Image: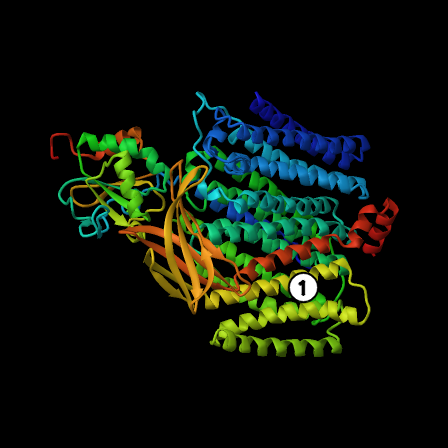
């Protein structure tokens, strides 16, 4: 006679799976702190989108806070947040670097010509290697890096004026402090 | 107005699904014939109203009603009619409606064809299908209503994702869903059996054709998806092991195991509880696949956070359906006894190996697919599991599966292998191995271990499949549909194996930069870019290259790869130029404009790749022929007395 508990195994295994799904659901990925927070920003030096001869790197803005925005022309959310980025750039509080991710150079340049360019410089990452270092798992994502070179905040998904005011602005040095 | 009618029809179909479930299950429990009849009428009503809702949504797309949010998100005024219709299932809400429509279709088919079944059993099946319908319709109405209005209405729509503007991908979802949802029938049969606590040969005979039908749709759906990925994504690959593909492949593996296990249950009354578990598993994986992957828990983890209500509903529904069935299984399955023995080389033991290996493959793929989720939940970091893992773990169970398949087909039930069969198999094995070595050496000038094993297994499976009808013809025996179907499907597996081995071993892929007039040599073929021109499509503009392929100066083909930019914006789309051949495909895709008149091109030589999909079509065809075997139709028409007699014989 077989032991009846054998027949319970599938139900137990499924219950275990459900527990994982519940944990997975509660981990709102938009709010998970990136493991990079508080650590120094991963270094990179990539070709500039506009000119392959120029290098754009993580140390370009050392000594002041800056933004890194991961974008691509194939990404709908990037188009959505573009207006917000333009507004932030117009405030002129801190430089914004673009990380053009897994994209096509010509298309990316056309995008910036057509929609406006909020970036001081754009690093070109067609293979996505730098994005992996930064733990990017979807575009758009926006990082705030402090004057000390540490990552202060990561925003996943299209940036909105509300999120900018709520999550980014309080982390910035007071206006008039430094540029 | 029409969208409101659609919305209202959905509400009515939910009410009818509730009455279908309640009247059928309560009627079966109480033995109340009137309630059971009411449950059956509700099936018809539900089908009519879901069809009405589906029709209303198609109408909104055809008429470009951009005041409906879903239409505005997924279509555009320039979109051609065919794609406007296909856009109906191009997004989350419409996919769900297609699911519900497919489920209503299967439900009405089962109800119509099951009049010979024992009335309470039939009612329980209908009632369980009703419960599943309730879940779907409720999910749609509470979190994903396709008829929500957009105020103010959009002037124009966002457009259907250009990747989906393609024939294969327009017909791929309905076929795939017919497969996914079709497993609901086997699931309902299994749950009804568990409720009743008895299982006989008639049950297996009943479930087999329905399972085969669902499985054949799933096979065609997966093959279409693979074919589409090959020519549309521009990489020339045919399988990427991404979570969406795995989500369709896992129920297919479970379904494949199920149709084999059902054979044993029908013929020999064995593997009863195992067969039931597989029936539950196949549908559970379909649900898990569509819901979890489509909603993005596994891929872009972003989607879920935007609407937690959807996530919670999905999880609750999954837990109720799958958990409920598994608890029922734990409670009732121990009562089902399989009392019979079989020899080590009998067909039963080969089918046992088949099931063990298929389930092993399934388990390893499930582990790889969910692993990132586990790691994330345990806060061990974000990982992704890629093709290297899947290719290895899939190969390990598949090689013995193919080797045993050839023998298993020739093994007799209960007894071992017959001497005549043994000699025949040894000959085929010898020929297959010799031919594999010769083919590798003569055709491709290279003998590699894994390639030789792949070719030998492919030829072995095809040879052992063909030997069955040949032996029967020689002995002037009839070939029943079930046998013919099995032979064709197994031959298809061999053919697919041949294609996979050929393309994985000998493909040549080269990315080159060419200006007009330049040529590159790939696999002995000269690909010359002869011109580039701008082309205007209905809703896109494209750059079209002309690539003339020649071999030793002889022209072979002219390819026209395109790079399309859709007016709605977004990612540029690649239309590969492909010359199809029996021995090889020649593939050219336009990459990027490198400036100064130079373009990057992806040029590929793909030997035998066609056989992957041709094999898949044969597998589906075999499934169809087997499903139409005479004995299933007879059993469908059998009188209640005959069913009772079979049941009595089965329970001996």
Residue B384 at least partly seen:
no
Residue B54 shown left or right of residue A61 in the figure: right
Q: Residues within 10 Å of mark 1 (few under 14, many from 20)?
A: many
Task: Check the residue under mark 1 and report the chain it is in.
Answer: B
Q: Quadrant of residue B136?
A: top right
Q: Which x, y percent locates residue B229?
A: 48, 51
Coloration of the structure image = rainbow
Residue B312 shown left or right of residue B542 in the figure: right
- Secondary structure of the residue carrying numbered label 1: helix
Residue B473 at least partly seen:
yes
Q: Which x, y percent locates residue B31?
A: 80, 35
Task: Indicate whether B490 appears above or below B434.
Answer: above
Quadrant of the image containing the N terminus of chain B? top right
Q: Which x, y percent locates residue B44?
A: 72, 32
- The residue lying toward the viewer, choosing from B345 and A128, is A128
Quadrant of the image containing the C terminus of chain B? bottom right
Residue under numbered circle 1: B351
Q: Which x, y percent locates residue B184?
A: 65, 44
Task: Indicate whether B407 appears above or below B529.
Answer: below
Q: Residue at x 19, y 30 (%)?
A: A91
Farthest residue, direction right: B641
- The residue lying toward the viewer, choosing from B175 and B235, is B235
Q: Residue at x 62, y 71 (%)?
A: B460
Residue B94 shown left or right of residue A90 in the figure: right
Farthest residue, direction front: B554
- The residue lying toward the viewer, choosing from B282 and B340, is B282
Residue B174 shown left or right of residue B230 in the figure: right
Q: Residue at x 33, y 38 (%)?
A: A78
Task: Indicate whether B635 appears above or below A113.
Answer: below
Task: Indicate whether A16 appears above or below B270.
Answer: above
């Amino acid at each position: 006679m077989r032991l009846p508990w054998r027949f319970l195994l599938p139900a137990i295994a499924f219950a275990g799976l459900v527990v994982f799904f519940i944990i997975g659901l509660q981990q709102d990925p938009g709010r998970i702190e990136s493991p990079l927070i508080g650590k120094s920003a991963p270094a990179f030096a990539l070709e500039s989108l506009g000119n392959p001869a120029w290098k754009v790197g993580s140390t370009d803005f050392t000594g002041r806070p800056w933004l890194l925005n991961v974008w691509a022309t194939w990404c709908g959310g990037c188009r959505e947040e573009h207006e917000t980025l333009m507004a932030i750039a117009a405030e002129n509080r801190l430089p914004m670097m673009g990380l053009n991710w897994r994209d096509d150079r010509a298309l990316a340049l056309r995008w910036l010509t057509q929609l406006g360019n909020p970036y001081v410089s754009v690093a070109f990452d067609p293979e996505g290697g730098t994005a992996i270092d930064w733990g990017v798992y979807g575009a758009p994502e926006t990082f705030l890096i402090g004057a000390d070179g540490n990552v202060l905040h990561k925003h996943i998904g299209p940036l909105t004026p509300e999120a900018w005011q709520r999550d980014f602005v309080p982390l910035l040095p007071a206006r008039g402090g430094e540029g | 107005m029409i969208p409101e009618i659609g919305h209202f029809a959905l509400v009515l179909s939910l009410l009818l699904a509730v009455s279908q479930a309640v009247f059928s299950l309560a009627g079966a429990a109480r033995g109340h014939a009137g309630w059971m009849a009411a449950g059956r009428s509700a099936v018809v009503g539900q089908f009519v109203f879901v069809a009405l809702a589906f029709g209303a949504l198609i109408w909104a797309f055809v008429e470009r009603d951009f005041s409906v949010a879903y239409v505005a998100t997924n279509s555009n005024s320039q979109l051609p009619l065919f794609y406007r219709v296909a856009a109906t299932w191009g997004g989350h809400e419409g996919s769900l409606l297609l699911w519900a429509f497919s489920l209503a279709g299967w439900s009405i088919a089962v109800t119509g064809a099951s009049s010979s079944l024992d009335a309470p059993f039939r009612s329980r099946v209908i009632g369980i299908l009703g419960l599943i319908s309730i879940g779907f319709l409720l999910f749609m109405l509470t979190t994903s209503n396709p008829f929500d209005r957009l105020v103010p209405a959009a002037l124009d729509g966002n457009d259907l994702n250009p990747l989906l503007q393609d024939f294969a991908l327009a017909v791929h979802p309905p076929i795939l869903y017919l497969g996914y949802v079709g497993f609901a029938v086997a699931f309902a049969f299994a749950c009804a059996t568990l409720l009743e606590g008895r299982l006989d040969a008639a049950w297996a005979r009943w479930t087999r054709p329905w399972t085969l039908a669902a499985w054949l749709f799933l096979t065609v759906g997966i093959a279409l998806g693979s074919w589409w990925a090959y020519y549309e994504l521009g990489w020339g690959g045919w399988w990427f092991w991404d979570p969406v593909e795995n989500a369709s492949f896992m129920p297919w593996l479970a379904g494949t195991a199920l149709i084999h296990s059902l054979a044993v249950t029908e013929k020999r009354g064995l593997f009863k509880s195992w067969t039931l578990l597989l029936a539950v598993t196949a549908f559970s994986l379909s649900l898990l696949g569509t819901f979890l992957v489509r909603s993005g828990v596994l891929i872009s983890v972003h989607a879920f956070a935007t609407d937690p209500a959807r996530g919670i509903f999905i999880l609750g529904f999954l837990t109720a359906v799958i958990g409920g069935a598994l608890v029922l299984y734990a409670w009732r399955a121990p009562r089902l006894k399989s009392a019979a023995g079989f020899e080590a080389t009998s067909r039963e033991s080969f089918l046992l190996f088949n099931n063990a290996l298929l389930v092993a493959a399934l388990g390893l793929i499930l582990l790889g697919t969910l692993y990132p989720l586990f790691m994330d939940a345990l806060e061990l970091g974000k990982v992704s599991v890629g093709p290297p893992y899947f290719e290895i773990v899939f190969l390990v169970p598949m090689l013995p599966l193919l080797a045993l398949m050839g023998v298993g087909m020739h093994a007799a039930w209960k007894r071992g292998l017959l001497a005549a069969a043994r000699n025949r198999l040894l000959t085929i094995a010898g020929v297959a191995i010799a031919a594999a070595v010769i083919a590798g050496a003569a055709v491709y000038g290279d003998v590699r271990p894994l390639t030789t094993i792949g070719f030998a297994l492919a030829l072995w499976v095809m040879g052992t499949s063909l030997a069955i009808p040949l032996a029967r013809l020689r002995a002037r025996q009839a070939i029943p549909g079930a046998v013919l179907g099995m032979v064709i499907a197994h031959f298809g597996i061999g053919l697919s194996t041949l294609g996979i081995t050929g393309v994985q071993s000998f493909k040549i892929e080269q990315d080159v930069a060419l200006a007009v007039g330049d040529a590159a040599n790939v696999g002995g073929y000269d690909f010359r870019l002869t011109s580039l021109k701008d082309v205007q499509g209905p809703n896109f503009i494209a750059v079209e290259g002309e690539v003339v392929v020649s071999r030793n100066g002889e022209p072979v083909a002219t390819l026209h790869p395109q790079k399309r930019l859709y007016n709605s914006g977004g990612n540029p789309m690649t239309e590969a130029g492909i010359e199809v051949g029996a021995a090889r495909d020649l593939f050219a895709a336009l990459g990027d404009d490198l400036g100064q008149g130079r373009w990057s091109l992806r040029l590929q030589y793909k030997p035998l790749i066609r056989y992957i999909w041709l094999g898949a079509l044969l597998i589906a065809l075999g499934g169809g022929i087997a499903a139409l075997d005479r004995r299933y139709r007879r059993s469908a028409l059998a009188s209640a007395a005959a069913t009772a007699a079979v049941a009595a014989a089965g329970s001996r």
